[in-house]
Image (spheres, rainbow, N blue to C red):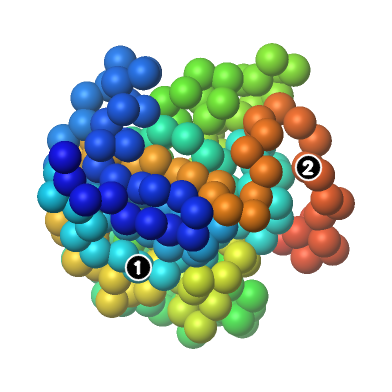
């Protein structure tokens, strides 16, 4: 059995991702990915243990799977699509299409709402949790929510919570990850220590901030 990584009070390993995948009739190759929202980290894992770890930004609002919550979802996902092959670092993508413009040419770049450099689009694999609709009929579909792993204009904020629910990395980490990770790669998102493991169907346990209510995912 490979060595697991301790992230706060949570053990994350390739075997953990594989077990979760097996529960949902999914196969897992190597490497696999895991994200700890509570610790602001993305891990690259194989059977032997941790291959790499990167600081990651997550959702500005309390973690949630619900559309328009601006929270990062939980559970099993896979990398469904990739966008941005060969783009210059910092080029903005809108609707997953290159604009030909560096983020610094946008007046509001400092808000951090731009998706830049590369996109790994995620698809949730747990029906009613991060795929489809929940038991209340609300959209909880990570793919339809445009949940990505992507680059950001605000690399100084990576490791904190400021996105519209996506996972944002620094370019120096994102570019090699993008090249190394094939389509279909499994990703487990753990809300982690200090965050309720409740379920995604409950209302947000804290009111969203003004920034959360008015923020937007500019590149959906």
Quick one: quadrant of the N terminus?
top left
Residue 82 percent coordinates (x, y): 28, 48
Instruction: Kindly tell me whether residue 13 is visible in this rendering.
Output: yes
Disc 1 marks which residue? 54
Q: Which type of secondary structure does the marked residue at label 1 adopt? A: strand
Identify the residue at horizontal 76%, vertical 31% (top origin): 202
Image side of residue 109 versus residue 125, left or right? right
- Mark 2: few, some, or many residues within 10 Å (few <14, many ≥20)? some
Q: Which type of secondary structure does the marked residue at label 2 adopt? A: loop
Q: Is residue 48 above or below residue 218?
A: above
- Mark 1: few, some, or many residues within 10 Å (few <14, many ≥20)? some
If you read the primary sequence from the N terminus, does the residue marked by circle 2 or circle 1 appear first? 1
Image side of residue 38 versus residue 43, left or right? right
Identify the residue at horizontal 70%, vertical 51% (top origin): 62
Residue 63 percent coordinates (x, y): 64, 47
Q: Which mark is residue 85?
A: none
Q: Quadrant of residue 174?
A: bottom left
Identify the residue at horizontal 51%, vertical 83% (top origin): 156
Identify the residue at horizontal 25%, vertical 37% (top origin): 15
Q: Is residue 12 above or below residue 141?
A: below
Q: Nearer the viewer, residue 64 or 18?
A: 18
How many badges with numbers are in the image? 2
Residue 114 percent coordinates (x, y): 52, 67
Q: Nearer the viewer, residue 213 or 26?
A: 26
Disc 2 marks which residue? 204
Instruction: Kindly tell me whether residue 117 is visible in this rendering.
Output: no
Residue 116 percent coordinates (x, y): 41, 67
Image side of residue 213 versus residue 111, left or right? right
Q: Is residue 174 above or below residue 132?
A: below
Image side of residue 109 versus residue 167, left or right? right
């Amino acid at each position: 059995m490979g060595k697991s990584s301790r992230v706060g009070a949570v053990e994350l390993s390739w075997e953990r991702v594989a077990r979760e995948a097996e529960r949902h009739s999914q196969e897992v190759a190597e490497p696999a990915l895991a994200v700890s929202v509570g610790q602001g980290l993305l891990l690259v894992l194989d059977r032997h243990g941790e291959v790499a770890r990167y600081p990651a930004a997550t959702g500005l609002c309390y973690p949630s799977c619900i559309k328009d919550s601006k929270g990062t979802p939980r559970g099993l996902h896979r990398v469904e699509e990739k966008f941005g092959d060969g783009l210059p670092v910092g080029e903005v993508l809108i609707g997953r299409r290159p604009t030909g413009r560096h983020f610094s040419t946008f007046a509001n770049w400092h808000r951090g709402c731009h998706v830049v450099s590369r996109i790994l689009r995620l698809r949730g694999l747990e029906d009613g949790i991060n795929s489809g609709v929940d038991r209340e009929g609300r959209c909880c579909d990570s793919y339809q929510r445009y949940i990505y792993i992507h680059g950001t204009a605000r690399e100084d904020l990576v490791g904190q919570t400021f996105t519209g629910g996506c996972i944002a990395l620094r370019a120096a980490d994102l570019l090699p990850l993008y090249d190394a990770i094939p389509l279909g790669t499994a990703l487990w998102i753990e809300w982690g220590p200090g965050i309720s493991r409740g379920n995604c169907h409950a209302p947000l346990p804290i009111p969203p901030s003004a920034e959360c209510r008015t923020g937007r995912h500019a590149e959906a």
